[in-house]
Image: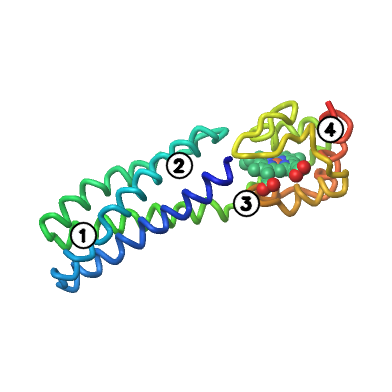
Amino acid sequence: MYKAFLHTHTLVVTLFFLIYVVKTVLLLSNREDLLKRFTKFVKIPEMIVSVLFLVTGIYLMTQLPEIKMILWVKIGLVLLSIPVAIIGFKKGNKILAALSLLMITAVYGLSEMSRKQKPVIAVEGNLDGKTLYDANCKLCHGEDGKLGAMGSSDLSKTTMDVATIKQTILNGKGSMNKIVMSDEQASAISAYLESSIKGK
Ligand code: HEC
């Protein structure tokens, strides 16, 4: 479910962005006729894309274990860019149109940045499996492994063995980023999962 929404969100955001780019390029290059035709052509798709953008975005937000500052910045920029774009395109104001595209580009950039950022949340030197689990994994998987935030797997039901769990921590899996920590710490967490969470 989470993944379907995430993929739909990525797709509609990309489409939304592309429509914006084309419109802005047409406006900036004084292709008024073409811009008018393009705007008419994408009117319905744009409406569908915007609604899906909103619905999937809100759903994804409800699945987040915590809402970071960067997300509020992104939401603020999107909300601000809408009236700027509407006025910009309605009045044929190139500066406003370019400004709204710039804002949307910034949101896109911020999203890419936060995706690539790897969490570095190892508790220095600590080798206690439970402490490490609580510090690094609880947010998404929950104390008992069952939380499932952001589409994460129920760890109490995992069929992974200790070695595979360790690899999952160190290399990441699908939408779970790798967690930067030492080999020994990853082993300690895997052993804790095996003894206290798996099958419980
Ligand atoms: C930011 C959220 C997040 C954090 C923090 C996180 N995970 Fe995950 N985890 C996920 C998601 C999402 C998946 C599902 C990945 C997929 O299959 O695409 C997952 C999957 C897994 C799986 C695979 C289970 C299976 O049976 O497929 C294991 C094991 C796992 N996580 C362990 C951990 C451990 C241990 C930690 C802490 C060191 C941790 N995770 C921290 C989100 C998170």
CA gap between label 2 and label 1 equals 25 Å
In front of the other: 129 or 32: 32
| Mark 4 secondary-structure assignment | loop
**Can residue 121 be spotted in the picture?**
no
Which quadrant contains ligand 1?
Answer: top right
Say few, some or many: other residues with alpha carbon within 10 Å of mark 1 (under 14 / 14 to 19 / 20 or more). few
Say few, some or many: other residues with alpha carbon within 10 Å of mark 2 (under 14 / 14 to 19 / 20 or more). many
Q: Nearer the viewer, mark 4 or mark 2?
A: 2
Q: Residue at x 67, y 29 (%)?
A: 147
Residue linked to disc 2? 56
| Mark 2 secondary-structure assignment | helix
Q: Which of marks 2 and 1 is in front?
A: 1
CA gap between label 3 and label 4 equals 26 Å
Q: Nearer the viewer, mark 1 or mark 4?
A: 1
In front of the other: 100 or 151: 151
Say few, some or many: other residues with alpha carbon within 10 Å of mark 3 (under 14 / 14 to 19 / 20 or more). some
Residue linked to disc 4? 198
CA gap between label 3 and label 1 equals 42 Å
Q: In which quarter of the image is residue 138?
A: top right
CA gap between label 4 and label 2 equals 32 Å
Dot 2 or dot 1, earlier in sequence: 1
Residue linked to disc 3? 118
Dot 1 or dot 4, earlier in sequence: 1
Dot 3 or dot 1, earlier in sequence: 1
Q: Which mark is residue 40?
A: 1
In front of the other: 40 or 86: 40
Q: Name the amino acid type tagged 2.
A: Thr
Q: Which of marks 3 and 1 is in front?
A: 1
